[in-house]
Structure formats: structure tokens, C-alpha cells
Image: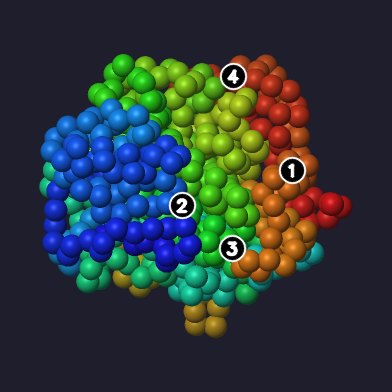
Amino acid sequence: MVAMAACSPGASQAPPRAATPRGPEYLVFYTQGGQQQAQQAVESAGGTTLANDAKLGYLTTTGGGGRFAENVGADGSVVGVSPDRSIGFAEAGAARAATRRTGGAKGRTAAFPDARSFTRSGSGEPLAGRQWDMRMIGADRANAKVPGSRQVLVGVIDTGVDGKHPDIAPNFNRELSRNFVTDKPKDEDGETLDGPCEVSGCKDPVDEDDDGHGTHVASTIAAPINGIGIAGVAPGVQIVNIRAGQDSGFFFLKPSLDALTYAGDIGVDVVNMSYYVDPWLFNCTNNKADSRKEQLEQAAIITGMQRALDYARQRGVTLISALGNGSTDLGHPKVDKESPGYPVGEKKERQVDNSCVNVPAESSGVISVAGLGPSGRKAIYSDYGAEQADVSAPGGDALDGKGAKATRSILGAAPEHVLRAAGRIDAKGEPKGADVVKDCKGGTCAYYQYLDGTSMAAPHATGVAAILVSRFGKPGKGGLELAPATVEDLLYKTATPKACPTPRQYVYKAYGQDVTQVCEGDQADNGFFGHGVVDAWKAATVES
């Protein structure tokens, strides 16, 4: 089953769950004060309440037959019903293949030309010369002035973090890290999802990442200055793995709720969320193309995530999210061809509008980050929107220039076993292509890979936020505390404003095609760059 956060005041529980498989489980979200009525609705629909989460206001239930969600959702005390896609039992087996649907890039794959012209840097970390992203936001200079405090905790809500990676381990807080996901070898239709489990019980250790996405994100935030590989934006802060993503890259509702609640309970200062909650890219509560059951599920995702985000933010957690990689104007969405993304094969085309939201990027209280290429332009893949883009940061764009080059993407740490499984390094441990880099020191070797996506942009903003908490935070739970509203204000204040391109109808040229995207807003706040490009140097030097 999906791991639960430790109990604390305000959380009540039903009797322990039985250790045998049962029918489908659902999360039933109720109105304030509506717990008892919602439980009665569950019973009337033929279901059983297994647990009550009083912190976020929902019941975990089971049973009730094929129309359980619709029957329960008809009660006035219920605001949303979502399947709980947790796993109970699975066979252990050999290591899985490493071709994954990543939470941020959502399945993007690319082959890159050679980039071996780069050499070791003469100053800073050995691979600093490859980190154009850090130079763009002044992190290379900020590292020396304000590397960040060990009292600052940054939560990475992702596919996991390789806590044993040489460029992660010094800043990895194993004691506080948690995994809220149980691997699922196959989906409901018997198709491969996460692949065979590596460990008994199918719950990976807290220092494991079988995808690589979360490890890349973590290293951008806080890879230490230790003489090997790269340095992160805030190389002195601590990383807490709060895993909510499957090995396959899917992020379901319940683990996300547990992760955010846990972050709030332990005093995490900033969380990075480089994903959207599956299975809906856009969540609509009343789309005519959706069944009533599908509408209730989307309402549950919107409601449940907002409650979890509010819970964390009220406890001092600054919330930062990737904006998305659909090249979509989120202020004027028209078509969703990606939902529902799970189970595989269920996608349909439906018309959407601005009442439909991407979660958590468009949830209240979240700072959403658009991606930039090395030229400073908004990356071709990055979503945008005058109301949706809060700030921008380097996310990489292999197509930002003539041809495609790996070095236009973002270099970050990669788990060795993931690269081996994907065939990206040979039997001797040498990279097979320019998208992978190896660096060694004193007999210890570490691996890195180039990736692009708003998944890579968000951790740059998260690192800058960590610098701000390090400078202006006061002693509190978990170490230092700084109100999320203050962090947000300072992040915007220190960002470098960037105006829309001229003309506003920017034309991208990719693989012989023209793609036009329109930027709305002024220099102070617009749909491509938000309040500006995050700036680590300004964050390290600004006066409060």
C-alpha cells in the first residue's frame, strides 16, 4: 500500500486495513463538517470506510460496485471522488528497463549530436563549464557568497532521489526522506507499468531512484561543492526525498497528498514539484466529453491537491512547480489529447477551456516556472500564459539554435544503474553518447545526463528560494523558517524582468516547421517570462 505519513494531532484513523486484496479503493473528499454525512453516503452506496484523513478532509473507502463513485458523488457532502491507485501485492523480480515516462518531460526522448568539445572547467566544479544555466542566473557567483544553510530543508517530490550519488550524498537527508509510493509492475489491464520490483514488498528504499528524473532535479537544486561534477544553485542546503512518483513517471493523487502533508509536518522550507497529477493533463469538473465518474475524479484532484497545498503552505512550505511541456497557452487552452493518461490506451480528444486546470501548476499558492533555452528565449516546449507563468528559469532547449545540441540542455546528476539499464553507458562504464557525462575524482566516478523540460527549470527557482530562506529565515521547525508569501515576494523582487519578444507572435522553427506562440503582458509580468528570470546572485545580495 502507499505509505502513510506518521500520525499527528488532527488525523484520525479507521481500523487497520486487512492484509488481503479487496475491491477498488476510492478517496472521497467531503465538505467542511461533512465527514459523518459522507461516511453515511459511502455506506448507502454499499461501500466501507477504511480511514479518515481529517487534515485534508477525505475518506479512504472500498467496495460499492461499478457505480460507487457516481452514487457517493451525488450526496451534497461530497465534493469529489477519485480512485486510489495504490498497490497491495506484487511479485519481486529482475531490474526493470529504464525507458520511463518522466513526470516533467512526460515521455520526451531525444538523440543528441556529439558535445565532447567541452573540457573541465578551470575554476569551480569540474563540469562547471557545461553549466550555462548556472551562469545565466548568477548561481556560479552566488555559490561563493551564499551557498545556502544546512538548516534549510528542500523537499523533492518526484520519482525518488539517488541518495548515494557522489554529487548528492553530502547534502542528502536520509533520516527525513520518505517514499510514499509502492511500485506497480503491471496496470489494471496487465500491461507493464513500473516493471518487476527490485525489492521485497515493491517499496524502494528512500535513497533510490529508478527513473533518474528526481535525481536530476535534486542536483540542480543542491549538488554540493565537493570537487566532483557540478554544483547546484544552493550547494549548502539539505535535500529531502519525498517520493510521490512511480518508476514509470506517473504521479497519482494519494502519494501527492501524503507527500505535501508530510512536508508541512516536518518543517520543509521549499518543495519542488516537477510533474502534474495523473491521469488528467487538464482537470475539468463539468466537461461534457467526460462521464460523471471522470468529472468527480477531476474534482477530487483539484480539491484534494488544493487542500494539501494549503496545508503545506500554512506550515511554512514554499511551493514551486514546473509549468508544463505542452507548448500550450494555459490561459487559452483548446484541446486536450493526453487525458486520461492512465490506464494506457484511454486517451481521448476533448475540447477544454480556461476553467480546466493543470494541477499543481495552476493551483492557488504555487509558484509556476516556465523554461528557457540558452539564448534566453522561452523554450519551444514550455507552456506559457499571462496568468500562469510566475517566473522563468533555464530548462534547456536542444533546438535553441542551428540544429540540435545536447549542450543546450541542462546537465544534472544521473543514477548509474538507470543509465546502464537504458544502454547509455557500456560495460566498462564509459558513456555511449554526448547526452551522458562521466566525471571521476580519487577513484570515485559519477554520472550526469542532459535533459530539458520545465522539470529542469523549476529546480533553479527552488534553489533560489532556498538561498532566500537561508538569508532571511528565522529559527523554527526543521531549522529555518520564512513565510511562503515573503519568499514569493523576494523571488519576484530579485528576478530580472524580461519583456515579450517583438513581435509578440514569436515563431519557432523546428524540424522544418514553423510554430507560433503569442506572448501577452508587459515587461513586469508576461506570459513567457512571468515576473522575470530568477536570479541567484540578486537573491544572495538583495537587502530585505
Distance between the alpha carbons at the discs numbered 2 and 3: 16 Å
Discs 2, 3 touching: Cβ within 8 Å: no
> Is 396 rendered above or below residue 507?
below
Q: Tell me the residue that label 3 is attached to.
A: 267
Q: Residue placed at 41% from the left, 29% from the top?
A: 282
Circle 2: is it few (<14), some (14-19), or many (20+) Cα within 10 Å? some
User: First in sequence: mark 4 or mark 2?
Assistant: 2
Q: Residue placed at 72% from the left, 67% from the top?
A: 475
Percent coordinates x, y for residue 450 in the rendering? 49, 52
Is 8 left, or right, of 234 in this rendering? left
Q: Is residue 193 visible?
A: yes
Circle 4: is it few (<14), some (14-19), or many (20+) Cα within 10 Å? some
Q: Quadrant of residue 301?
A: top left
Type of residue at label 1? Asp
Q: Tell me the residue that label 1 is attached to.
A: 489
Discs 1, 4 touching: Cβ within 8 Å: no
User: First in sequence: mark 2 or mark 1?
Assistant: 2
Dot label at residue 518: 4
Looking at the rendered structure, the secondary structure element under dot 2 is: loop
Type of residue at label 4? Val
In the rendered image, the quadrant that contains the N terminus is bottom left
Distance between the alpha carbons at the discs numbered 3 and 1: 20 Å
Q: Quadrant of residue 376?
A: top right
Q: Tell me the residue that label 2 is attached to.
A: 55
Which label sits in the foreground, 2 or 3? 2
Looking at the rendered structure, the secondary structure element under dot 3 is: loop
> Is 302 rendered above or below residue 111?
above
Circle 3: is it few (<14), some (14-19), or many (20+) Cα within 10 Å? many
Looking at the rendered structure, the secondary structure element under dot 1 is: helix
Type of residue at label 2? Lys
Looking at the rendered structure, the secondary structure element under dot 4 is: strand
